[in-house]
Every structure is written in C-alpha cells, then in structure tokens.
Amino acid sequence: NAFFVAELDGAIVGTTGVLIEQRAARMVRLGVARERRRSGVASALLDKVVEFAARAGSEELVAHTQPEWPDAMRFYAAHGFVAYGRDNVDVYLRRRVSGVVP
C-alpha cells in the first residue's frame, strides 16, 4: 500500500492512495487542487500508482468516481479505464495495469 503526494513550490497540489488487494490494486481518492487541474498532476499521480501496482504484481487497477463529475469520468476514460459497475453513488472503473482492459 502507498500514498502519493504531488508538490509544487512546497505546496501540496495533489494526492492519491493505492491499496494492493490480491490481483488488483485499488486507487483511493485521486484529488488535485482546483487551480492545478488540467496541468498533468493527476496523470503524474496515476503513473506512480500504475508503476507501484505493477511492481506489486497487480494485474488490474480499480477506481471509482461519481457519475456527476464529468471531468473525472473523462480523465479515467482517457487513461484506459472502463466502467464495470455502479451503485447509488459511484461508478466503478478498471483497467489493466499494463494497459486497457480488453
């Protein structure tokens, strides 16, 4: 398990965590400061999560977000995630650690 922090000029601008669970890694709460969104911070954090998951032997990475957050939905889709379920609050997404789920 790991927690990643993105810093810029000594200020925290993004965070995420990853939990290793058997064959899958679960990304937890990817967040980026509003004024730093669309600047590559989230992509850089995701890259670190994927690298960590690969080293841990995970086959897939799972995440979840709320469907009413279209920017988050687009971000995950652009990074190879596909929806595989949902509940009353969240959409559940996954991708292979080494690429897109076929």
Image: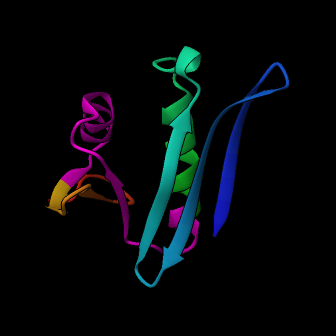
In this view, the residue in front, 34 or 7, is 34
Q: Residue at x 51, y 24 (%)?
A: 40
Q: Which quadrant would the N terminus be assigned to in this image?
A: bottom right
| Residue situated furthest front in the rendering | 88
Q: Residue at x 33, y 35 (%)?
A: 72
The answer to which image quadrant residue 63 occupies is bottom left
Q: Which quadrant would the C terminus be assigned to in this image?
A: bottom left
Image spot of residue 26 (x, y percent): 45, 66
Q: Give, as a single range, the part of the protein colored magenta.
A: 53-82
Q: Residue at x 26, y 55 (%)?
A: 90
| Residue situated furthest bottom in the rendering | 22
Placement of 51 over or under 35, stated as above or below: below
In this view, the residue in front, 10 or 24, is 10
Q: Would you say 60 lies left or right of 14 here?
A: left
Placement of 44 over or under 61, stated as above or below: above
Placement of 83 over or under 33, stated as above or below: below
Image spot of residue 38 (x, y percent): 45, 18
Image spot of residue 14 (x, y percent): 62, 35
Colour mapping used in the image? rainbow
Q: Would you say 95 lies left or right of 35 here?
A: left
Residue 23 lies in magenta, yes or no? no
Q: Residue at x 19, y 52 (%)?
A: 82
The answer to which image quadrant residue 41 occupies is top right
Q: How many marks?
A: 0
| Residue situated furthest right in the rendering | 10
In this view, the residue in front, 67 or 24, is 67
